[in-house]
Amino acid sequence: MKLQQLIQYLHRYEVSSKVNPEISSIVMDSRKVSEGSLFFCIKGYTVDGHQFAQEAVNKGAVAIISEKPLDVAVPVIVVPDTMRAMAILADVFFQQPTHKLHLIGVTGTNGKTTTTHIIESIFQHHQRKTGMIGTIYMKIGNKTYPVKNTTPDALTLQDSFHQMVEKKVDTVVMEVSSHALHMGRVYGCDFDVAVFTNLTQDHLDYHKTMEEYRYAKSLLFSSLGNSYNLAKPKYAVLNADDPASDIYKRATAAQVITYGINETSDIMAKNVKTSAKGTTFDLVYDNKTVPINLKLVGQFSVYNVLAAISASYVSNIPMETIIPVVENMRGVPGRFEAIEAGQDFTVIVDYAHTPDSLENVLKTTKQLSQNNIYCIVGCGGDRDRSKRPLMAAVAVNYASKAIFTSDNPRSENPLQIFKDMEAGVKERHYEIVEDRRAAIFKAIDQAKSGDVVLIAGKGHETYQVIGDKVLEFDDRKIALEAIQSKQSS
Ligand SMILES: CC(=O)N[C@H]1[C@@H](OP(=O)(O)OP(=O)(O)OC[C@H]2O[C@@H](n3ccc(=O)[nH]c3=O)[C@H](O)[C@@H]2O)O[C@H](CO)[C@@H](O)[C@@H]1O[C@H](C)C(=O)N[C@@H](C)C(=O)N[C@H](CCC(=O)O)C(=O)O
Ligand SMILES: Nc1ncnc2c1ncn2[C@@H]1O[C@H](COP(=O)(O)OP(=O)(O)OP(=O)(O)O)[C@@H](O)[C@H]1O
Ligand SMILES: N[C@H](CCC[C@H](N)C(=O)O)C(=O)O
Ligand SMILES: [Mg+2]
């Protein structure tokens, strides 16, 4: 595509030259520039990408998109906001891939990764070729690709959609984080179905207030089509039991379908019964009632399943296809994942890293065992500090033995993170073991028959970030080592 053809999609810009080179790639990282690239200067949180313009030109960039005039030997297109320009041009450059896909976006504080996996599985069983983008990986069919963010920047995102279209994917299900909505990473995405899981405290380091956080999530619903198109109707799938849904309902012009357990909703679960073996409920929809038998445990799983059922049902997948898939779902990596090596106590690795998710998981754990519950928990550094005392309080309230340990301390001193956690706990019913491996070994060593050890916070993560070091670390492997070491001693 030629430069001048591409930039005509920008609303407001000034271009320093009429030169019209062919654009071979669009890039936001100077280290990835090659001959023929169009380079976007992005003011980041760490550095200002404008300082890499010359380096980009040296590497072969044939034009630069910038927020100020630059003294370089290639055309400079000055725009008010390079991030916005990048999202618009990425959509155009990759030939508006989301118009060719059935795109389902899932937002909410907890349950996005789990819900997207259930939706993916339903569509796959309906013989659809799927793509998935989220916290754990990007997937095309069953092939996985590593990711840096839950919802990637607009360039990576549109490039991924383009690759999916090339590989004949017809349906994409993706997690849409509040950061992404707020930063405009999903501008240009033509969502067909937007799903809301729930809203509880997280990310106040970034959004500052719950109102701002709630507002960021509303952007997914307000971006759904404003005029009704019979051939491609848009749907907002909302959790009737979460008060934020009232706001999202008003934010969207799309058809609204609700799901829930307590409030009357279009797709409802009644008579929910949870046990260690699974969960049963009556699925009530369209004046029908169908008994459901899940292998997934915990009431929170019912919500994720209802959200996935609703998103699939409005996408015209018959319930006869949907129901057996949800009944056979065995879970998602690092989400309530049991580590089994023949021991007589239960070890669960889970990604709970918010007060609400930790509470949900601990409640579920308590239903599974009358014996001691060990909870190993930490809080990530350089993230919402105000959730730390709340998470600590939840751990101490629900567990028989809480062990505070390091999660990803990042640039923070772990001792300061423990201090923030301890502020939420009145009595000292907890222990601090800074080294996560030692904490896991300690709990597993002490666990007796029938006890449960919950290792919370890192789930599928295979690393631990301490300072600027990214060290290999996988809760699941360490837990297995600890169980085996106990068995052989
Ligand atoms: C705060 C934040 O969101 N930061 C994102 C941001 O990084 P940044 O602003 O630090 O970038 P930067 O390093 O300052 O670089 C600025 C620009 O200069 C460029 N550059 C940089 C160096 C160089 O040599 N040459 C060069 O051109 C960079 O490519 C970039 O375009 O842009 C990067 C590229 O898109 C993101 O990967 C990065 O996410 C970081 C890793 C992050 O941790 N983000 C979190 C807060 C986040 O977004 N989380 C949500 C999930 C939350 C949840 O679900 O719980 C998510 O969607 O992942
Ligand atoms: N519907 C739910 N409500 C509350 N907690 C949940 C729910 N579903 C899962 N959880 C808990 O939250 C944790 C994270 O779940 P999941 O990874 O699906 O959420 P996510 O929204 O993708 O999180 P992230 O924002 O970090 O990507 C799980 O390990 C579990 O402890
Ligand atoms: N997407 C979440 C992941 C948190 C995972 C937890 N292990 C941590 O490092 O805090 C975040 O960036 O806040
Ligand atoms: Mg996720």
Image (cartoon, rainbow, N blue to C red):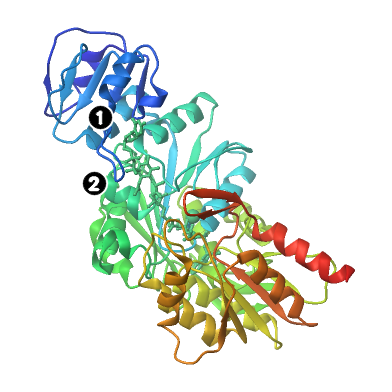
Q: Quadrant of residue 355?
A: bottom left
Q: Secondary structure at mark 1?
A: helix
**Residue type at the position of mark 1:** Gln
Q: Which mark is residue 226?
A: 2
Please give the residue where the numbered disc 1 appears in the rendered image.
51
Crowding at label 1, few (<14), some or many (≥20) Cα neighbours within 10 Å? some
Q: Is residue 220 visible?
A: yes
Q: Nearer the viewer, residue 109 or 242?
A: 109
Residue ID at (30%, 25%): 92
Q: Secondary structure at mark 2?
A: loop
Question: What is the CA distance from the residue labelled 1 to the residue labelled 2?
Answer: 40 Å
Q: Earlier in the sequence, mark 1 or mark 2?
A: 1
Point out residue 331 in the picture as x, y percentages from the top left corner: 64, 59
Crowding at label 2, few (<14), some or many (≥20) Cα neighbours within 10 Å? few
Quadrant for the C terminus in the image:
bottom right
Q: Is residue 249 visible?
A: no
Point out residue 81 in the picture as x, y percentages from the top left corner: 18, 36
Question: Left or right of 220: which side holds 481?
Answer: right
Point out residue 267 in the picture as x, y percentages from the top left corner: 47, 66
Q: Which mark is residue 447?
A: none
Quadrant for the N terminus in the image:
top left
Question: Left or right of 158: which side holds 221?
Answer: left
**Residue type at the position of mark 2:** Asn
